[in-house]
Amino acid sequence: MEMGVAAENGRRLQRALYVHSVGLNQLFRDNLHGCTDRTKVLGYLWIVYQHLLENVCKSEYKTLVYELTESLQ
């Protein structure tokens, strides 16, 4: 709000981020039954999600997560 976001818009954004994060996490959990290395697969899924977010945003910057994953390859 200090940066010009209206209070109601801020609350709406906060709720949306929470709902979508919980939903995506549940979707991952529901579809990884029988996985031999669930932790590793979840890690890869979050990395892919991060890359997709950066692509959708068409940003010029690289986030910390992106830089870390690039250094691991």
Image (cartoon, grey):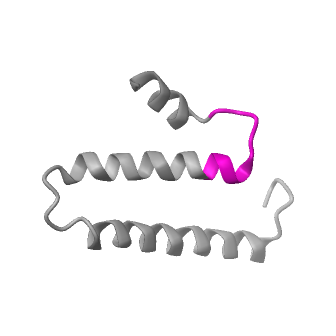
> For the point 17% across and 49% down, which residue is it?
37
Residue at the right extreme, as displayed: 4
Q: Position of residue 31 (x, y in %)?
A: 28, 70
Quarter of the rendering occupied by the N terminus: bottom right
Q: Decide if residue 34 is on the left or right side of residue 43.
A: left
> For the point 60% across and 74% down, which residue is it?
16
> For the point 64% across and 33% down, which residue is it?
62
> For the point 21% across and 54% down, which residue is it?
38
Q: Decide if residue 67 is on the left or right side of residue 25.
A: right
The reply to whether the magenta stretch includes residue 60 is yes
Q: How many numbered circles does the render carry?
A: 0
Position of residue 46 relative to residue 6, above or below, is above
Q: Which of 37 and 26 is in front in this view?
A: 37
Quarter of the rendering occupied by the C terminus: top left
Q: Where is residue 8 in the image (x, y as percent from the top left)?
A: 76, 77
Q: Which of 30 and 6 is in front in this view?
A: 30
Residue range highlighted in magenta: 53-62
The reply to whether the magenta stretch includes residue 72 is no
Q: Position of residue 33 (x, y in %)?
A: 18, 68
Residue at the top extreme, as displayed: 71
Q: Decide if residue 41 is on the left or right side of residue 70.
A: left
Asked where in the image residue 69 lies, by quadrant, the reply is top left
Asked where in the image residue 30 lies, by quadrant, the reply is bottom left
